[in-house]
Amino acid sequence: MSDVKQTEAQGEKIVLITGASSGIGEATARTLVKAGHKVVATARRKERLDALVEELGSDKVLAIAADATDYDQLAKVVEQAVAHHGRLDVAFANAGTGVSQAGTENGDPEEWKRVIDININALLWTAHATLPHLRERKGHFILTSSVAGRANHAGSIYSSSKWFAYGFGQNLAMEMAEWQGRCTTITPGMVNTAFFDEPKPDKLDPQDVADAVLYAISASPRANIREVHLVPTW
Ligand SMILES: NC(=O)c1ccc[n+]([C@@H]2O[C@H](COP(=O)([O-])OP(=O)(O)OC[C@H]3O[C@@H](n4cnc5c(N)ncnc54)[C@H](OP(=O)(O)O)[C@@H]3O)[C@@H](O)[C@H]2O)c1
């Protein structure tokens, strides 16, 4: 039996995670490896990805530093992932950022470009670069939208970018269904990560979102977990 067939038979999935250097992506990498999967971790900060490899093992985590807003860099990450593992089962498009200057009239158009680049364009690049490989595996695309992508927030460009992500996730699910692929949109409420300047210990933990990703990819192939909406209990 080839290596690919053998690990597939054992239920192991090869999962690409963007934004794996911190917060939700980092917690998801840990959780998936502990559950027996292999992770291709990408983000810009190489030293943080290397620390993850050190912690979880180079046989479990392949770290490739890249800026997800650069299509060519991201496409190379996907190429390297597939060359290394021979397949790609799941892509988790999670990299994203917030807006520091609130509102539209008082917002900063230069900052919006950066936010749109990572929250919208990089999401599209991740889908475009991974879909041919996911199709071969009847694979799974997962993305991090937000509770802010399902509710209105006065003048918020961040919320608008997450509305895009939410709508895209629904549309992509329909396209992937044509070949029995699955697509899950995760819409978390506030999570205690570096996304915020101040700690939010009373809100969701990144682990809670990582558990949602594991739930989605562990479901029976006949069940497509289209959305996971999770908010802090208190
Ligand atoms: N925290 C919340 O309350 C919350 C709630 C709902 C949704 N979300 C969403 O959850 C996702 C993850 O955020 P988080 O809360 O885990 O925050 P975080 O800890 O700040 O993580 C953000 C991740 O995105 C990566 N990233 C940012 N710009 C990038 C770029 N140009 N290229 C590649 N990677 C880039 C960062 O890595 P590098 O800096 O190393 O590149 C980092 O790994 C985001 O999409 C966010 O909008 C967060």
Image (tube, rainbow, N blue to C red):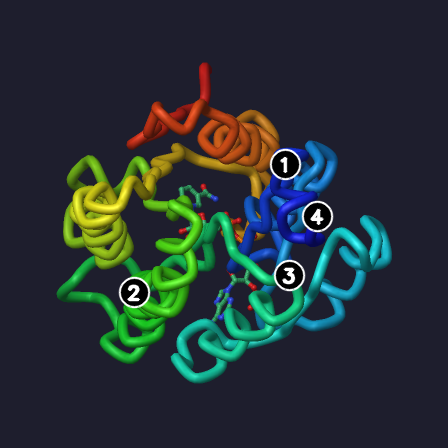
Indicate the amino acid at tag 1: Ala
The tag on residue 1 is: 4
What SS does tag 3 mark?
Answer: helix
Alpha carbon of mark 2 to alpha carbon of mark 1: how far?
31 Å
According to the picture, the residue beneath numbered tag 3 turns out to be 85
User: Furthest-bottom residue in view?
Assistant: 72
In space, the residues marked 2 and 3 are separated at their CA atoms by: 23 Å
The residue located at (49%, 81%) in the rendering is 73
**Residue position marked by numbered label 2 in the rendering:** 124
Residue type at the position of mark 4: Met
The amino acid sitting under disc 2 is Leu
The image shows residue 6 at horizontal and vertical percentages of: 69, 44
Query: At label 3, which amino acid type do we have?
Result: His
Give the structural element (helix, strand or loop) at label 2.
helix
Dot 4, how many residues are within 10 Å of its Cα: few (below 14), some (14-19), or many (20+)? few
Residue drawn where x is 46% and y is 59% of the image? 95
Circles 1 and 4: CB atoms closer than 8 Å: yes
Label drawn at residue 9: 1
Residue extending furthest toward the front: 1
10 Å neighbourhood of mark 1: few (<14), some, or many (≥20)?
few
In terms of sequence position, does the residue under pointer 2 or pointer 3 come before the other?
Answer: 3
